[in-house]
Amino acid sequence: MAKSKTTKAKKLTAKELEEVKNLQNQINTVVLNIGNQELIKNQLASRHTELQAEWKDMTISLEEKYGSVNISLEDGSITEVEEKEEETALA
């Protein structure tokens, strides 16, 4: 019969294993955070699109009611749009 050799499995030291696990956890956390940020970015982009649509609807409604005017965001006062401004906006 041939002699069987038993070889001892090589292992990292406890300190090395802990360092590897720690780095892997940090990498996983960063990757997870990148994914979360992309999700948030997409949600914000969608919300921005929704708000632009709401803005367009409101401006159409206000133009139907008041015509083409400038509205002060300070106090809500309305002033007529000068012809020059209208021509520039149409160009």
Image (cartoon, rainbow, N blue to C red):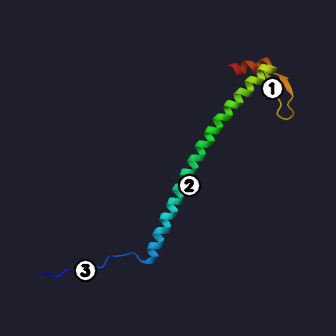
Residue drawn at (37%, 75%) of the image: 11
Q: From where the camera sits, is residue 8 visible?
A: yes
In contact (CB < 8 Å): disc 3 and disc 1: no
Q: From where the camera sits, is residue 81 visible?
A: no
Q: Nearer the viewer, residue 68 or 42?
A: 42
Q: Position of residue 27 (x, y in %)?
A: 50, 60
Residue drawn at (70%, 27%) of the image: 56
Which quadrant of the view contains residue 20?
bottom left
Residue drawn at (58%, 42%) of the image: 42
The residue under label 1 is: 70
Tag 3: residue type? Thr
Separation of disc 3 and disc 1 at Cα?
89 Å
Tag 2: residue type? Asn
The residue under label 3 is: 6
Sequence-wise first label, 2 or 3: 3
38 with respect to 58 (left or right): left
